[in-house]
Amino acid sequence: MVGGLGQRSRLLLAAGVIVFMGAYPHAPAKAAGLGGDCCADLEERVAELEATTARKGNKKVSVEVYGKVNQAVMWWDDGAEKNTYVIENGYNSTRFGFRGKAKISGDWSGGYRLEFEHRYAFGRNINQVDDDNNVDGRQLFTRHSYWYLNNKKYGELRVGLTSSPKDNINKDTMIYGNVIDTVTQDFFNMQGFFLRPKGFNTEVGNGQPSGISVSTLKYVDIARCYTAQALFDCSTRRNMIVYDSPKYFGSKEGKGFWADWGWGEDDIWSASLRYVDNWGENWQVGGGIAFEKFRDENVQNSGGGLNGFKRDIDEWAGSASVLHVPSGLFVTGAFTTSDNKDSNRQHAGVFTGTDSPEEVAWDVQAGIFRKFIDLGYSTLLVGFTNSEDGIGGACGATRRCGPNTLAGLGITTEITGSDVDKWYLALDQEVVPGAMDLYLVYQHISPEVDLVDSALNPVNIPLDDFDLIYSGARIYF
C-alpha cells in the first residue's frame, strides 16, 4: 500500500509526521512497521520539511521560541483616592523571544538572542490619572539583541544589547521557586504614582489634571538609584561586551562560583561574582556582589562630555539567601548603593551648596517554599525594604523643587533626602508545575522627604501612606 502512494499523498503523510514529531519530540524519526527501502523517499521529504520549520531554524542553527504572559488586577489606595486597574505586572512583564544556537566544533558553540517586552498598562508607569500609560503608542520594547560565543571550559562572550554583569544581582541568589517573577525588593507596581501630602485632597492646579490633588513628584523620584528608575535592580540591559566565566568549585556541575565582566556605552564597566550551591543534603545557599562604574554622559545615551560635563557614578549591590530544604524555610537579604559625583552635582544644592546624597537601601525577607498540595510548590513570604536618599530623579541636579512640586507647598525648596519604608506579603502558587503560577501580593509604603527653604529651615510636609494589592497569573511558554 505504501508503494501505491502518490507524490501528493506522500507529502501529506510527511507533514503529518512532522506535526506528530513536534507534539511528541521523543518519537522515533522513522515510521515503525513501514520498513523497506520504500520509505527512503518519505524520510528524505520529512527531513526537507523539518529543516524549514521554526523549531529547527535551519540545518546549522536551531531556534527556540520562549516567553511568558503576566497580567494582574491591582487595587490601590493613596490616602485620598482608591481605584482598581488591570495591569501588566511591572515586576516581570509579558515578553517573548528567540534563542538560536549552533555547534561549531568540540566545546565551541555560537548563537544569538532577541527578546521583546510588552508594556501596555505597565505597572511601573501607571498612576492616579493614567491607567494605561501607552507612551507614544509604543507597546513593544527590545530587551535583548546580541550574539555570543561559548566554550564549556572557558565561558561565554556576548556582544550587543545584553544584561550588564550587575543586572539582577538582587534576584539571582533567590533560590526558591518563581516568586522573583511576582515581587522583589523594588517598587515596580506603583513607582509612577504621584506623592500626596496628608490631608490635602483638593485640586491645586500647577498643570495637574483636573480633579487630582497630587504633586509633580512621584515615588520613582524618591526611591531609586541615580542611573535607572529602580532601587535595587539599577543595572539593566545595555550595549556591551560581556564575559561570563564557567562555574567553579561547586559540589556538582552547574554549581559554584562564577564571575562576569563587561564594558560598553560611553563608557560603563561592570563586574560581579556570584555563588549558588548545595551544602550537604539539607541546605541550598546563594550569594553575589557587583559593582558598576558610570562615565556615560547620558547613562544610556551617548553624550560626548559637552561643556565640560563629566559623569561619575559608582554603584554597588549584593544579595544572599539560604534555604533549608527539608522544611522549605528560607531567608534572603539584599543591599544597594548609588553615589553620584557628576561634575554638575558637586556643591550643587541650590540652598545648601552640598553634593547629592548617596542612596543606600536594604531589604530582608523570610518565608517558606514547599509542596503543600499536588498542584505544585507554594511560596509564602514576608519582607521589609528601607530606602534612604534615593532621590536620583527629584528636582534636577540642583535639587530645586519649585512651588507646588508637592501639592499645597507654595514655596521653593531644596530636597536634601528621603526615607521610604515598604512592608510586603506575597503568596505564589504553582498550578501547572514549571509553566503557570497564581499569585497574591500586599504592599504598604510609608514615604518621607527632607526639604529646606531658602533660609535653610526644615520644611515639614507629611505624606500619605500608599497601599496596594495585586493578584494575577503568569504562564510560561
Image (cartoon, helix red, strand yellow):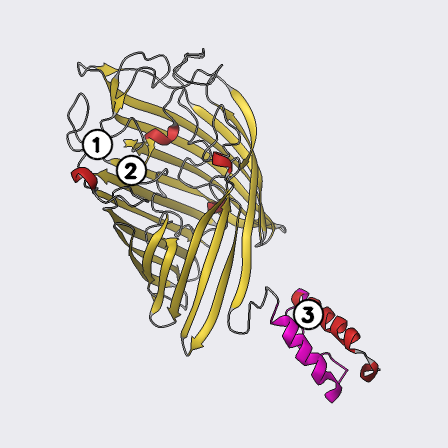
Residue ID at (75%, 86%) = 38
Q: Residues within 10 Å of mark 1 (few under 14, many from 20)?
A: many
Task: Give the residues in magenta.
Answer: 23-52
Q: Does 462 lie within the magenta span?
A: no
Percent position of residue 409, x then y: 32, 13
Mark 2–mark 3 Cα distance, whole angstroms, equals: 52 Å
Which label was assigned to residue 309? none
User: Splitting the image into 4 quarters, where does residue 387 fall?
Assistant: top left
Q: Residues within 10 Å of mark 3 (few under 14, many from 20)?
A: some
Query: For the residue labelled by badge 2, is the local secondary structure a helix, a strand or a loop?
Result: loop
Residue ID at (55%, 67%) = 57
Disc 1 or disc 3, which is closer to the eye? Answer: 3
Q: Which one is in front, 290 or 332?
A: 290
- Judged left or right of residue 369, residue 237 is left
Residue type at mark 1 is Ser
**Vertical order, 477 against 19 (above or below):** above
Q: Inspect this view and state whether residue 164 appears.
A: no
The N terminus appears in which quarter of the rendering? bottom right
Percent position of residue 149, x then y: 38, 68
The residue wearing badge 3 is: 18
**Vertical order, 3 against 402 (above or below):** below
Percent position of residue 296, x then y: 26, 46
Q: Does 39 lie within the magenta span?
A: yes
The residue wearing badge 2 is: 226
Residue type at mark 3 is Ile
Question: Which of the two labelled residues, at mark 2 and mark 3, occupies the earlier sequence position?
Answer: 3
Question: Which of the two labelled residues, at mark 1 and mark 3, occupies the earlier sequence position?
Answer: 3
The residue wearing badge 1 is: 356
Q: Dots 2 and 1: beta carbons under 8 Å?
A: yes
Residue type at mark 2 is Tyr
Residue ID at (40%, 41%) = 365
**Vertical order, 57 against 329 (above or below):** below
